[in-house]
Image (cartoon, rainbow, N blue to C red):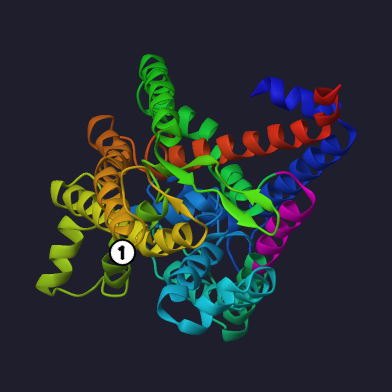
Amino acid sequence: MLTAFARAFRTPDLRKKLLFSILIMALFRLGSFIPTPGVSYPAVRECVGNNDANAGLGLINLFSGGALLQLSVFALGIMPYITASIIVQLLTVVIPRFELLKQEGQSGTAKLTQYTRYLTIGLAVLQSTTLVAIARNPGGLFQSCQADLVPSDSYVTIIIMVITLTAGTGMVMWLGELVTERGIGNGMSLLIFTSIAAGFPGSMWSIKQQNSWDTMLIVIAIGVCIMGMVIFVEQSQRRIPVQYAKRMIGRKMFGGSSTYIPIKVNMAGVIPVIFASSLLYLPALITQFQRNSTAEWVRWINMYLVRGDHPIYMLCYFLLIIFFTYFYVSITFNPDEVADNMKKYGGFIPGIRAGRPTADYLNYVLSRITLPGSLYLGVVSMIPLVALALLHANTANFPFGGTSILIVVGVGLETVKQIESQLQQRHYEGFLR
């Protein structure tokens, strides 16, 4: 990895792209510390110092790089865009119009991207309104901190806060697209990577303060082992061989080549973890507006579905990840479509007839390789919850495990692959000589 970056910095155009990406990431982190108008920053600092954040906000705070709990202008971070992208991707399976746009190529993709932007702004308005409502409620963002985070009750102040948070989300979306166009790698993924990686030093120091140097070193050693195992699984794939028959087109013979269909062990990526975390956050969000209620269902949710170290919460989290892994893989990989494309271009799997038998075989392989992938996601995602119970850390300050490690490793591997591919393109002439 270091060799790839060193070679990239020696290449002038790649150096410009890398420096541009680093500049955008620095601007993104700067916006995470600018407070939103109307927020009492001393009160926010007091509550953040208590390290008693609401456990349900852990995922959103993770993606915002800690900006959510500080109520900065980038408090919502990239989360509205992620949610909008997932919704649009799911709608391509449900709405025929979206499916046709997906098949149109670059023009259709541009329209879907525009729809995603509009939906992102709409979700940002909704989420910013919810965040302001929770922040105005004492104990909403922080369980035991009763400080008045938003002193003013003026509707003008609230509207300005909602507009500022929504504009911050639009700014983050624009920065991500700039990195994608002029930098290296996927801009949105790199911004998420920046948010998570920026919290690592503070998280490790927090573990040291709560425990000792020995505990921190043990956590670092465990983190390195987890990263090694995650890299191994993320690179693992089942390669299904495909043979293309020779075809005569005009006076030339085409085909006759051999290739393979790569089916990764973890085809769903980190999406099932996001789905499961978001779904489990909904009951906790509902109880935020029922804090003074004595209803039995409110007490049950607060007891079992808010605390991350409770066995019922862990079991629900684990089962939801497995369910969403199968669900997401089923809508992103269509064995019937792959089998039809192979038959159309004269491809076949050795020993399997083309058409329906090929689709059944692909579905058979996919269903069995998804099981270890879902269990892997569930186990990795449970690591911070186990740390919550054993090390008395919380899911916000335990950096190695769950969504954070999956995103950091995945984005890191993908970025290095893109750098190496561009290096090979620029040095391709040397291989011909």
Picture quadrant of residue 118: bottom right
* Residue 143 visible in rendering: no
In the rendered structure, the answer to whether residue 74 lies left or right of residue 349 reads right
Magenta span contains residue 180: yes
Q: What residue is disc 1 on?
A: 279
Q: As drawn, which residue projects farthest toward the right?
A: 12
The residue depicted at 42 percent of the width and 60 percent of the height is 332
Measured as percent of width and height from the top left, residue 342 is found at 46, 57
Residue 151 vs residue 360, the one in the foreground: 360
Figure check: 380 above or below 39: above
Element class at badge 1: helix
Magenta span contains residue 9: no
Q: Which region shows up in magenta?
A: 170-184
* Residue 169 visible in rendering: yes
Picture quadrant of residue 12: top right
> Label 1: how many residues lie within 10 Å, few (<14), some (14-19) or many (20+)?
few
